[in-house]
Amino acid sequence: MKKTIHFTYQQLPTIVAAYQKELKKYDVITVTGGLGAGKTTFIRQLMTLWGVDPMTVTSPTFTYLNTYDAHDGLVIYHFDLYRIGSLSEFKMLGFDEYLYQTDSKAILEWPEPVMSLLTHSVIHLSLEYGNQQDERTLIL
């Protein structure tokens, strides 16, 4: 069953805290939404709760992938696939090898080109603009 949560940026820490344990159950988290919808901001807040220094969490827009170590030994692979045009390009770059690694999570922004690889232990999140300037809607 899908959940829809409306929130403002001020409420983001509370929203992420409420769902972070549930999200940690999955090996792969996809995050979709328009440019500027808050995907990286959401991910930064989530990784902070998982023990990653928030000052190190940035969008891997130009590098495609950032790797982070959480306090519990978990490795988090944060992908931004906005500039990846196809599944074959993703595989050619060797990124498919990062999915479903032991003691790791993969978080993918703009996951559309690789959806066929995400076969299990995956949750899809969508961030959408709300009616007010700082309002967002999270669908999970």
Image (cartoon, rainbow, N blue to C red):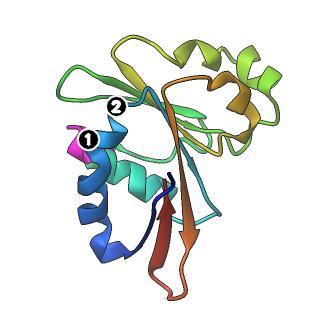
The residue under label 1 is: 21
Task: Please say whether residue 48 is one of the residues in the magenta stretch.
Answer: yes
- Residue at point 47% right, 53% down? 40
The answer for how far apart the CA atoms under marks 2 and 1 are is 7 Å
Q: Is residue 75 above or below residue 34?
A: above
Q: Is residue 109 above or below residue 91?
A: below
- Residue at point 24% right, 38% down? 50
**Image spot of residue 17 (x, y percent):** 23, 54
**Image spot of residue 105 (x, y percent):** 41, 27
Relative depth, front residue between 36 and 55: 36
Neighbour class for label 2 at 10 Å: few (<14), some, many (≥20)?
Answer: few
| Type of amino acid at the residue the image marks with label 1 | Lys
Residue 128 occupies quadrant: bottom right
**Image spot of residue 84 (x, y percent):** 75, 36
**Of helix, strand and loop, which one carries label 2?**
loop
Report the disc number at residue 71. none
Query: Over which residues does the magenta segment extend?
Result: 47-52
Residue 75 occupies quadrant: top left
**Of helix, strand and loop, which one carries label 1?**
helix
Q: In the current view of this chain or complex, which residue is farthest to the bottom?
A: 132
Q: In the current view of this chain or complex, which residue is farthest to the front?
A: 1
| Type of amino acid at the residue the image marks with label 2 | Lys
Give the tally of numbered discs: 2
- Residue at point 60% right, 34% down? 64
- Residue at point 30% right, 62% down? 15
Task: Please say whether residue 88 is one of the residues in the magenta stretch.
Answer: no
Left or right side of 12 for 109: right
* Callouts 2 and 1 close, C-beta under 8 Å: yes
Left or right side of 106 for 82: right
Left or right side of 36 for 116: right
The residue under label 2 is: 25
